[in-house]
Image (cartoon, helix red, strand yellow):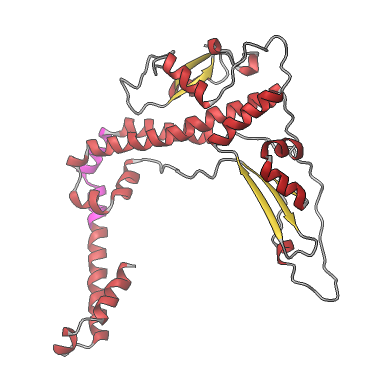
């Protein structure tokens, strides 16, 4: 892009003609100058990154970089929480259009088959738009029971921690880089910031929000020339609403009724505030570590019979939660 701008600039310089230099020759000169600057810059980078000054900086922040990368891995694990979609697999087929008129049927050619896509009638697609949760449960075989409620609560808890973690991780990395910026070459921190962070060992932070699962209802007309689609993205807001929707229609067991809480964003915040934003295992807190990711965890895991009740929930820092696994504190 910059090269094109330079060439465009050259074409509009009138003084080139005055000094008897042809535009084509002047463009070649500019290209050679740009190439020379690029080569000098690359040599400078190699010399800098193999020099003692950079190696000393890298050793100085090595433990902090490793901690950031472990947090990055933890966030990826949280975001990979799986929502099982039990739509039946009806097998594969090959479809041939042998009609005399050989219509293009463009929408039929674009039709996709996947576990999160329900190919349906126009009526179902339209109703899914009006009552998304009802139709998700009906057509993707999500039964309103305690097991599925717990599954979606866990997904929400993990996704919310992941979204918060991305912001905190970026601030944590920025703090580390800012803390050593006076020791870094001006050219490197100005022109090659991303490469500098990579050379320090930082993993790239993925800010993509595409990991939120989505359910798709799609109608394609019989002629294949028209289609409708209803996409229901299960982001933080929709997960909160879906959890409340399931809770309203679930017939809870008597032992759970009256004491079970819903693991929503508001409950998560309540537990963090109750525990004064402090890890109940190691004592780490946001007062001591401002960019610390704190999570809400079941003291007795659900897999071991624990319930989502306030007295069975506690605040853990991401390090303690990651090392805990399914163990009871």
**Residue 294 % position (x, y):** 43, 23
Q: Quadrant of residue 234?
A: top right
**Residue 91 % position (x, y):** 81, 49
**Residue 286 % position (x, y):** 35, 22
Using residue 78 as the reference point, say whether residue 293 is left or right of it: left
Above or below, comparing residue 4 to residue 212 in the picture: below
Using residue 276 as the reference point, say whether residue 314 is left or right of it: right
Residue located farthest toward the front when viewing the structure as drawn: 130
Residue at position x 54%, y 35% from top? Answer: 237
Above or below, comparing residue 189 to residue 300 in the picture: below
**Residue 166 % position (x, y):** 42, 36
Q: Main secondary structure of the magenta part?
A: helix
Quarter the N terminus occupies: bottom left
Q: Quadrant of residue 84?
A: top right
Q: Quadrant of residue 233?
A: top right
Inspect this view and state whether residue 116 appears. no
Q: Nearer the viewer, residue 103 or 182?
A: 103
Residue at position x 38%, y 14% from top? Answer: 283
Q: Nearer the viewer, residue 214 or 123?
A: 123
Residue at position x 48%, y 45% from top? Answer: 208
Inspect this view and state whether residue 112 appears. yes
Q: Look at the image and say whether residue 53 sits in the magenta stretch.
A: yes
Using residue 96 as the reference point, say whether residue 129 is left or right of it: left
Which range of residues does the magenta coloring cover? 44-60
Q: Nearer the viewer, residue 41 or 242?
A: 242
Q: Look at the image and say whether residue 91 sits in the magenta stretch.
A: no
């Amino acid at each position: 892009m910059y090269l094109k701008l330079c060439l465009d600039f050259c074409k509009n310089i009138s003084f080139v003609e005055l000094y008897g230099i042809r535009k084509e020759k002047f463009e070649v000169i500019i290209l050679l100058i740009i190439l020379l600057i690029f080569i000098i810059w690359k040599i400078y980078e190699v010399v800098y990154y193999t020099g003692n000054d950079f190696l000393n900086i890298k050793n100085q922040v090595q433990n902090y970089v490793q901690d950031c990368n472990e947090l990055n891995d933890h966030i990826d694990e949280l975001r990979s929480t799986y929502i099982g979609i039990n739509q039946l697999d009806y097998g594969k087929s090959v479809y041939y259009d042998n009609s005399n008129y050989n219509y293009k049927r463009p929408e039929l050619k674009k039709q996709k088959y996947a576990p999160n896509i329900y190919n349906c009638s126009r009526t179902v697609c339209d109703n899914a738009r009006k009552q998304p949760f009802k139709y998700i449960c009906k057509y993707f075989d999500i039964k309103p029971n305690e097991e599925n409620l717990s599954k979606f609560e866990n997904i929400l808890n993990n996704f919310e921690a992941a979204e918060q973690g991305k912001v905190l991780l970026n601030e944590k990395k920025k703090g580390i880089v800012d803390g050593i910026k006076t020791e870094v070459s001006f050219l490197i921190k100005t022109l090659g910031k991303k490469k500098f962070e990579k050379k320090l060992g930082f993993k790239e932070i993925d800010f993509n929000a595409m990991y939120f699962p989505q359910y798709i209802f799609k109608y394609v007309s019989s002629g294949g020339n028209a289609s409708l689609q209803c996409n229901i993205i299960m982001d933080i807001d929709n997960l909160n609403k879906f959890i409340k929707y399931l809770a309203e229609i679930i017939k809870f067991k008597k032992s759970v009724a009256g004491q079970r809480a819903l693991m929503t964003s508001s409950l998560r915040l309540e537990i963090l505030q109750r525990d004064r934003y402090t890890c109940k295992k190691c004592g780490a807190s946001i007062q001591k570590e401002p960019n610390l990711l704190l999570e809400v965890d079941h003291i007795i895991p659900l897999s071991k019979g624990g319930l989502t009740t306030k007295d069975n929930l506690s605040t853990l820092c991401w390090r303690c939660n990651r090392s805990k696994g399914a163990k009871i504190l």
